[in-house]
Image (tube, helix red, strand yellow):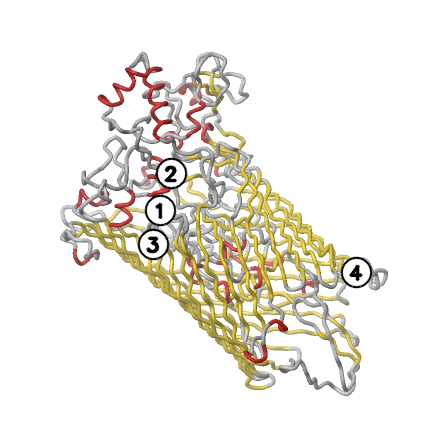
């Protein structure tokens, strides 16, 4: 460790003659020992030689046999996202990160190497500084929330994504969907440094579709057509009379033209963040402390997120062989999120559905809600979204603490033991209030809902690490870790509701309600005990063999199958270390990897294996219960058996590099609800049946094509391709049936393959709708019921992308840097859940607004179009659910554009002000989106399920930032 002037002193044995000097992100250098050394390390530019975080420790990157990707602090910090999982989009090959909602603090779907389960979840395991983290949406009344939003991205040192068995199997029963390791920043010995960063910006809608709601004149055009085509009118004059007199539409409707999307959105929603950190120490004690504030307003009214967070960690070396580390982070946040989906209080639904001739305000500027139950009687019960946003609230308050303490004792030079205790605490309070004057709460005289959730979990790990060299050169050795681990989670949930509130907006809490309407509470608990071991055998850094074994016992499963065994074996051959390549000037790294093993998936919730009775069915005023779960003593983990073959290549001193992986991940013992006779008292039983397969390829390519004294160009590209197939179900069944879902899980097909009527288009002769009547698509009919008789309505179209990835370029000239990242997604289809309302072919015209695609409807014989003749009432039922409402999801997005300037020290009096670095930057996120399907009526990013549920719009952010180091 150097002092403030870069001077270092190293004490070495008298027999030593060489120093090996290394640092993360720099090429290691060997120098002969002398009394006075001057050493300069060069940047590794994506080198494969650094030390990376792996399960229960660190390891030299070239010696890792598993498949993994590391994302560094510079790629995470100061990003305009409420949670770190959003920053992973495009950063890791094989990792799909997509958001279904743009609400601040919203959940994000993370899938690694395909969907691996039908009912047990496909989210990866997150481990934060040894804490097996609780993630996902922990709320019950809020439309979307994210437990990871409690973590400040600026406090993260690195993220390691583990993908295959060799990398993940040591986590056993929870590693089936991959593992994400988060390492937070720690103190470093040396001069104490103070760092401050801030970013201020604005959010707006990231994607504006061409297919959008109609204006008043366009709506009148369609209304006239629909009435004439239905035979209610012979011409426009008669149609206008019906519109004004029979439909009750205001006489001035064409002169009023409200753009409801503009009404419910923030064109310039503010966003800001401020972060302050302090780190330093000496050889014995190092510390790191930070504090931050993050605020973001969403793209729609009534959406915002505020977070305060703090973090402190300390490492103290008690003696040469004893070190203690402790850390504690905490945050408190408040999130406001409106309703979504088809609820009348959803502002996004209002933007699409409300007719343009209504206005949110009265002529005097006051809010319009003259009719307390529904202001717009022809709009199917929709309410004025501005009133709803002003008078109602849907709030989530979350307080989170994460802490860890560990001790490392070095018994011998080659043997150390580590004990680490980590814990998490979540305290979540949700308050919802619907006013008594107008909207959803009017019928009850006002509604209030309060939910409280407390979650506490801890992980205690104890393991030994033993290293043994087997030759005098000390380049043949093995390393073995073995230990035990215990995990426990306790969850408590309480909810209550009441109605009839005081006729004032000042009293919005449950205590003020006049009539209780519901109460419920339940405690839950999960416990897991484990033993594990990891071993690596290294021969001259050329050949590395690794293996791991873990035995987990979980309270989640049946008494007869609570313990499961998980293992992996991996090998790597660093060909560049062979004598014939060791001195090559071209090949810096040539590494072949292979691994196989078995991991598990235990994500089925609480007590699924137990026979349960549910109380809450009162009878004659007395408590009553019903059988709610028949139980299964044989229930156990889903099993994942992934095979991985990969190669890592670096050329010309790591100037260029590539990583290629092929994987085949087989999942068996799928947890599925198997139908039972209703005489059993229940309709199904959870069993381990069925199988699935994901296989694909991942490619990462990067390097520095141009490097001069003042200018450099760094580029990286990643590509992911996955194929999913269901290979078996229970008792020889070939399908689970759609059950009203968009998907029907069927053997031989993708788990997210759409199950829908097959739309065949429009008959050009008469404008009638057409559906396919057979699977070969050789027959069509205008009768919608004919398509329902098709034996198999699987479309061959999937909600999962075939390919996705990113292209990132960074151009640097002296202190000026420009980073450009494009994210691409190809091969999936997105379903418009409410398309039959907005593209109704006359079915809902005059009640709900229609989209501009309706203007391309059939008019006369010979017209080629995908929109049938507009007929008032839609007697042909052409708007029935079908593949007509599937849209091509291919898109390319300018995900990140950042221009930064590091001010040279010569330009400012740095020494006088003790400034070590000063950076200013401008950033844009989600700036431009290109879509293949020009009729797509919503943002192409719609989460893993790929359907438009009318959630808050994905934001585009433009921000200015400043970083100062003292």
Nearer-N-terminus badge (1/2): 1
Circles 4 and 1, Cβ within 8 Å, touching? The answer is: no
Q: Which mark is residue 576?
A: 4
The x and y percentages for residue 950 are 39, 41
Task: Provide the secondary structure element on which disc 1 rests.
Answer: loop
Spatial CA distance of label 2 from label 4 is: 59 Å
Circles 1 and 2, Cβ within 8 Å, touching? The answer is: yes
The nearer-to-camera label among 4 and 1 is: 4
Circles 3 and 1, Cβ within 8 Å, touching? The answer is: no
**Residue 233 falls in image quadrant:** top left
Spatial CA distance of label 2 from label 3 is: 42 Å
Q: Residues within 10 Å of mark 1 (few under 14, many from 20)?
A: some
Q: Residues within 10 Å of mark 2 (few under 14, many from 20)?
A: few
Q: Is residue 771 left or right of residue 251?
A: right
Residue at image mark 3: 336
Q: Which mark is residue 179?
A: none
Quarter the C terminus occupies = bottom right
Q: Is residue 114 left or right of residue 346?
A: right
**Residue 21 falls in image quadrant:** bottom right
Residue at image mark 1: 630
Nearer-N-terminus badge (3/1): 3
Q: Is residue 839 above or below residue 51?
A: above
């Amino acid at each position: 460790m150097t002092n403030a002037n870069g001077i270092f002193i190293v004490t070495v044995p008298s027999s030593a003659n060489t120093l090996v000097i290394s640092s993360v992100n720099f090429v290691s250098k060997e120098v002969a020992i002398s009394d006075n050394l001057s050493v300069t390390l060069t940047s590794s530019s994506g080198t494969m030689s650094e030390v990376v975080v792996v399960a229960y420790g660190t390891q030299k990157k070239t010696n890792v046999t598993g498949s993994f990707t590391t994302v560094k602090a510079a790629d995470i910090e100061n990003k305009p996202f409420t949670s770190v999982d959003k920053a992973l989009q495009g950063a890791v090959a094989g990792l799909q990160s997509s958001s279904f909602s743009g609400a601040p603090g919203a959940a994000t779907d993370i899938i690694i190497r395909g969907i691996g389960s039908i009912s047990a979840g496909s989210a990866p395991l997150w481990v934060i500084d040894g804490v097996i983290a609780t993630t996902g949406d922990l709320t019950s009344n809020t439309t979307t929330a994210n437990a990871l939003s409690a973590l400040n991205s600026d406090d993260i040192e690195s993220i390691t994504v583990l993908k295959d068995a060799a990398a993940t199997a040591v986590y056993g029963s929870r590693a089936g969907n991959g593992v994400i390791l988060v390492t937070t920043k720690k103190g470093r010995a040396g001069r104490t440094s103070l760092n401050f960063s801030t970013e201020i910006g604005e959010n707006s809608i990231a994607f504006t579709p061409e297919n959008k709601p109609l204006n008043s004149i366009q709506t009148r055009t369609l209304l006239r057509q629909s009435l004439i085509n239905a035979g209610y009118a012979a011409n426009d004059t008669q149609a206008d009379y019906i519109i004004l007199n029979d439909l009750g539409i205001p006489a001035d409707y064409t002169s009023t033209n409200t753009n409801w999307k503009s009404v419910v959105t923030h064109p310039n929603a503010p966003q800001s963040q401020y972060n302050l950190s302090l780190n330093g120490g000496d050889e014995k004690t190092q510390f790191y402390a930070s504090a931050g504030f993050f605020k973001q307003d969403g793209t729609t009214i009534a959406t915002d997120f505020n977070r305060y967070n703090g973090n402190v960690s300390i490492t103290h070396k008690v003696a040469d062989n004893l070190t203690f580390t402790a850390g504690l982070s905490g945050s408190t946040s408040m999130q406001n999120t409106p309703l979504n989906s088809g609820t009348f209080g959803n502002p996004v639904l209002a933007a699409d559905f409300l007719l343009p001739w209504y206005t949110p305000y009265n002529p005097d500027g006051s809010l319009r809600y003259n009719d307390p139950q529904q202001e717009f009687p022809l709009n199917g019960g929709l309410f004025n979204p501005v009133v709803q946003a002003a008078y109602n609230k849907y709030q989530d308050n979350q307080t989170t603490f994460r802490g860890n303490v560990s001790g490392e004792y070095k018994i011998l030079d080659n043997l150390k033991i580590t004990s680490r205790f980590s814990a998490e605490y979540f305290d979540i309070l949700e308050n919802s209030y619907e006013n008594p004057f107008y909207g959803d709460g009017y019928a009850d005289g006002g509604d209030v809902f309060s939910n409280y959730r407390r979650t506490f979990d801890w992980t205690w790990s104890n393991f030994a690490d033993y290293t043994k060299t087997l030759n005098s050169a000390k380049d043949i050795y093995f390393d073995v870790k073995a230990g035990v681990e215990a995990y426990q989670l306790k969850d408590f949930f309480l909810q209550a509701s009441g109605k009839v509130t005081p006729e004032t907006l000042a009293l919005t809490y449950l205590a003020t309600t006049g009539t209780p309407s519901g109460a419920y509470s339940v405690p839950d608990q999960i416990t897991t005990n484990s033993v594990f071991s990891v071993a690596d055998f290294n021969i001259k850094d050329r050949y590395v063999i690794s293996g791991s074994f873990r035995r987990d016992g979980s309270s989640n499963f049946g008494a007869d199958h609570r313990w499961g065994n998980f293992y992996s074996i991996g090998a790597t051959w660093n060909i560049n270390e062979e004598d014939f390549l060791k001195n090559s000037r071209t090949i810096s790294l040539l590494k072949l990897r292979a691994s196989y093993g078995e991991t598990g998936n235990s994500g089925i919730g609480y007590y699924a294996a137990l026979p349960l009775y549910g109380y809450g069915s009162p009878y004659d005023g007395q408590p009553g219960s019903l059988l709610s779960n028949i139980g299964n003593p044989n229930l156990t983990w889903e099993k994942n058996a992934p095979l991985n073959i990969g190669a890592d290549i670096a050329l010309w001193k790591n100037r260029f590099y590539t990583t290629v992986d092929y994987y085949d991940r087989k999942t068996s013992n799928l947890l599925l609800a198997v139908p039972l006779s209703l005489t059993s008292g229940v309709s199904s039983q959870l069993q381990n049946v069925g199988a699935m397969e994901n296989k694909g390829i991942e490619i990462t390519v990067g390097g520095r094509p141009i490097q001069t004294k003042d200018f450099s160009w760094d580029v990286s590209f990643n590509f992911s391709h996955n194929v999913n197939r269901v290979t078996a179900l229970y008792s020889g069944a070939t399908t689970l049936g759609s059950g009203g879902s968009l998907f029907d899980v069927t053997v031989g097909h993708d788990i997210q393959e759409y199950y829908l009527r097959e739309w065949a288009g429009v008959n050009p002769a008469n404008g009638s709708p057409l559906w396919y009547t057979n699977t070969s698509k050789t027959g069509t009919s205008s009768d919608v019921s004919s398509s329902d008789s098709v034996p198999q309505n699987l479309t061959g179209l999937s909600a999962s992308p075939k390919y996705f990835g990113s292209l990132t370029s960074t151009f640097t000239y002296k202190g000026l840097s420009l980073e450009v990242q494009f994210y691409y997604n190809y091969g999936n289809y997105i379903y418009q859940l409410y398309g039959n309302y907005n593209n109704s072919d006359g079915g809902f015209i005059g009640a709900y607004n229609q989209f501009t695609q309706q203007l391309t409807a059939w008019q006369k014989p010979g017209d080629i179009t995908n929109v049938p003749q507009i007929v008032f009432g839609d007697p042909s039922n052409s708007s029935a659910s079908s593949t007509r409402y599937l849209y091509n999801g291919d898109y390319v997005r300018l995900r990140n554009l950042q221009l930064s300037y590091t001010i040279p020290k010569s330009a400012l009096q740095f020494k006088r002000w003790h400034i070590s670095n000063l950076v200013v930057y401008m950033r844009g996120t989600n700036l431009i989106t290109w879509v293949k399907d020009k009729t797509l009526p919503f943002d192409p990013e719609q989460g893993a399920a790929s359907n438009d549920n009318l959630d808050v719009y994905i934001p585009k952010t433009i921000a200015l930032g400043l970083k100062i180091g003292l």
